[in-house]
């Protein structure tokens, strides 16, 4: 894998499983830039976030093996697949990790639930320039062609300029025809949350069970520098995401929280 | 629940399941500060990160119901439990969310894999002051008593001063006897990663399966302002964690990445 010449070597993964249209498109685009290793899950891993498989073994199978394209199918989470590729299957670090294209949004705080972005964050922790792509259309036959020139722009830039160590990109794509896409905006993560609704039912034996549904609530709909604003105005939203979650602004203020050994009477 | 008087109302959760010693201790401590609702999983959810249950229903059962303590057992992930409590079971927002005490470390970048911290991050997204506690001992009978006075200090401070909206605390506790604990340090997240080892075996039918194991690698062992340094020197490490992952330092530099509509020839 990745042996054909000096072309970049690109790791592609997703959280919708190997049959998803989104990863087919992303693989096709990636192959225009370099040699590709695809690690995709046997089935959808949506909502799996940064899960790792600890108690069960991880199974994987090579299903394609040419100089330009190697494909593995993994029974595990997206992060399992990235770890497997980086630590076991590959003798070298990839030049780029691409995750997606996810079927459905991962903007704003959805980044924390997203297997797509977890794979990109895992890449960044291992110092691989990494990008997660998500289209705001969860249908299995969504149109992944419309934004192709813009995806290529972002990939080209990343290959040329790299990303700072420990930072990856969260790219969300509006679900509109190509002629309606306005361009690419670099944004911050919107302050918002999912307001869940639990539809609770009684089973025949009297136990309760609930189905989780929800809708997104934007706390700052007027803010023009956010990813939600960009998407609502038909821009691709590019958010640089840090893997260092420290609230540095708070460190100084919290120094008075520090304490030495507690006095004996408290023990 | 939470009706007894004007005492703070505290939501307690974990990712090791309702039988874990860590959540028993944390519940006992929480009840010294206020009225408590416990949401714990039926079984261990370690490594589940910020997973949510989308495709299956979530089951839950009330197992205790007094004015001072209400307990639910949830068949779902830690984040499912927090969402269920905040959006469905509770008529009001808790004054505090406590998650843990986890059996095992969640320092440095382990924060991204941690169900304990995912519950705290979910609380912070919903603007509840939230703290995740983890003890650096994964044994089921670990000593959760040693650090009790320090846990109380952190909880007391948080109740008195609150936390900024969207920020929670990641508190890791050294696994040493009380007299060896040096105090509490406010730190930043260490730059480090898990270097995985996959032990790969062949099954009788010729398929491969791998067990995920690994060891932590600290990229900055000399840095005295990190959580790893604090823990190695027997301090409780308190890291303020943001739920806004934006790399603000990069926003300006990336503005040249912005693009308008692509030219027609690229379409």
Image: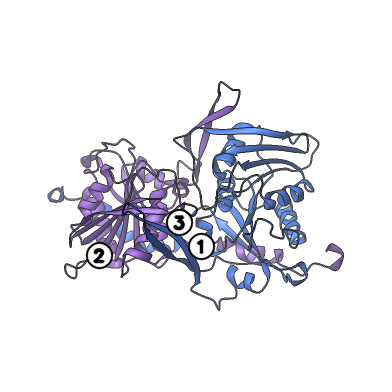
Chain colours: A blue, B purple
Label 2: which secondary element: strand
Q: Position of residue A249 (x, y in %)?
A: 44, 64
Q: Which numbered circle lies on residue A246?
A: 3
* Vertical arrangement, residue A65 with respect to residue A260, above or below: above
Residue A31 at x, y percent in the picture = 77, 46
Marks 1 and 3: which is nearer the front? 1
Q: Residues within 10 Å of mark 3 (few under 14, many from 20)?
A: many
Read off the residue under disc 1: A109
Q: Is residue A13 above or below residue B259?
A: above
> From the viewer's perspective, is B25 left or right of A53?
left
Most distant residue in the left direction: A265
Left or right, A170 with respect to B5, comes to right
- Would you identify the image quadrant in which residue A223 lies? bottom right
Residue B167 spot, x, y in % from top left: 41, 62
Q: Residues within 10 Å of mark 1 (few under 14, many from 20)?
A: many
Secondary-structure class at tag 3? loop
């Amino acid at each position: 894998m990745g042996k054909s010449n000096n072309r970049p070597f690109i790791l592609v993964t997703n959280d919708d499983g190997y049959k998803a249209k989104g990863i087919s498109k992303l693989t096709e685009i990636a192959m225009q830039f370099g040699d590709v290793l695809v690690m995709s899950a046997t089935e959808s891993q949506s909502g799996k976030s940064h899960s790792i498989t600890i108690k069960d073994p991880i199974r994987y199978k090579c299903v394609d093996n040419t100089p330009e394209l190697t494909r593995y199918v993994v029974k595990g989470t997206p992060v399992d697949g990235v770890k497997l590729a980086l630590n076991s299957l590959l003798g070298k670090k990839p030049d780029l990790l691409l995750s997606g294209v996810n079927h459905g949004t991962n903007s704003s705080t959805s980044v924390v639930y997203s297997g797509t972005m977890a794979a990109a964050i895992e890449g960044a922790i291992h110092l691989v320039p990494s990008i997660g792509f998500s289209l705001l259309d969860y249908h299995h036959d969504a149109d992944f062609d419309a934004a192709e020139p813009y995806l290529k722009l972002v990939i080209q830039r990343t290959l040329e300029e790299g990303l700072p160590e420990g930072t990856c990109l969260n790219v969300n794509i509006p679900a509109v025809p190509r002629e309606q896409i306005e361009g690419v905006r670099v944004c911050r993560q919107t302050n918002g949350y999912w307001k869940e609704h639990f539809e609770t039912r009684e089973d025949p034996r009297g136990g309760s069970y609930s189905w989780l549904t929800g809708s997104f609530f934007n706390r700052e709909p007027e803010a023009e520098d956010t990813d939600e604003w960009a998407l609502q105005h038909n821009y691709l939203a590019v958010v640089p995401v840090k893997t260092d979650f420290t609230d540095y602004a708070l460190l100084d203020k919290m120094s008075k929280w520090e304490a030495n050994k507690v006095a004996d009477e408290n023990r």
